Image (tube, rainbow, N blue to C red):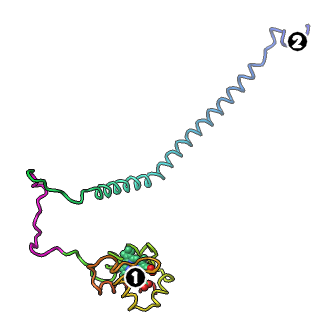
Amino acid sequence: MRHHPVGLNPYVELPERPLSKHDSKFFNTFSTIIGVLIVITLVLIGLARSIGDPFEKARYESEALDHARVLERLAPAGLVAVAGHDNSTIAIVASAAAGEAPKAALPANGEETYKAICSACHSAGIGGAPKYGDKAAWAPRLAQGKPTLYDHAINGYKNKGVMPARGGNPALTDDLVKQGVDYMAKAAQ
Ligand code: HEC
């Protein structure tokens, strides 16, 4: 029996396409990895949504609120009756207590005075106003004594900033202004 090189002997079984086997194994592994990655992606999308949803909802709601506020501000300040036209929709309706001029409701005490008027500047320290509860800012002011503070709050005061008389509300009684001062002074002691 003569010895033939393997490649030339038609009767010698060649190894069964070894490269192809390797390819299919690689393909299987690769598909598994891709599959796992897809699953992870879907899980992450779901997770991101569940985390983001409450924020998205809050943003949507605050936008709706902003919108309502904008409409309120854009509303006309008054309507004009035009001679010769039907102006019935803007007829002036007499108030229930006819004869008595409607008075703007005044705050009832120091806290309400602060909240309704003084807080506009004193809660955030607008224009150099001593902030509510800020002991350091109030200390030199309190040192002037209550009568001076009352006087400055009632009649106005200008130093580095401008404290308008009665916080800019002329209807406020002396007593309420004083109570407002007391309310802020108490929080800064
Ligand atoms: C428009 C803004 C504004 C409003 C509203 C306002 N303040 Fe002031 N207030 C200021 C500013 C600014 C100062 C600081 C003035 C300065 O020191 O120059 C001040 C200072 C004061 C002081 C200290 C005065 C001093 O002698 O140091 C008192 C007391 C005071 N305000 C009371 C009140 C009270 C009470 C109200 C509400 C009834 C009120 N303010 C409303 C702006 C405001």
Q: Looking at the image, can residue 132 be seen? A: no
Residue type, label 2: Pro
Query: Marks 1 and 2, how far apart in space?
Result: 114 Å
Which of the marked residues, 1 or 2, is nearer the chain's N terminus?
A: 2
Task: Name the magenta segment's main secondary structure.
Answer: loop
Q: Which residue is mark 1?
A: 157
Q: Percent from the top left, x then y, of residue 102?
A: 17, 73
Q: Nearer the viewer, mark 1 or mark 2?
A: 1
Image quarter where ligand 1 lies: bottom left
What quarter of the picture does the N terminus occupy? top right
- Residue at coordinates 56% horizontally, 43% vertically from top-left? 40
Residue 68 shown left or right of residue 28 in the figure: left
Q: Does the magenta portion include 70?
A: no
Look at label 1 and name its amino acid.
Tyr
| Pointer 1 with pointer 2, Cβ within 8 A | no
Query: Is the CB–ligand 1 distance for label 1 below 8 Å?
Result: yes
Rendering coords of residue 23 (x, y %): 70, 26
Residue 63 drawn above or below residue 124: above
Q: Is residue 20 above or below residue 166?
A: above
**Closer to us: 48 or 66:** 66
Q: What's the magenta region?
A: 86-102
- Residue 122, image x and y in percent? 41, 76
Left or right of 167, for residue 36: right
Name the residue tied to disc 2: 5
Q: Secondary structure at mark 2?
A: loop
SS at badge 1: strand
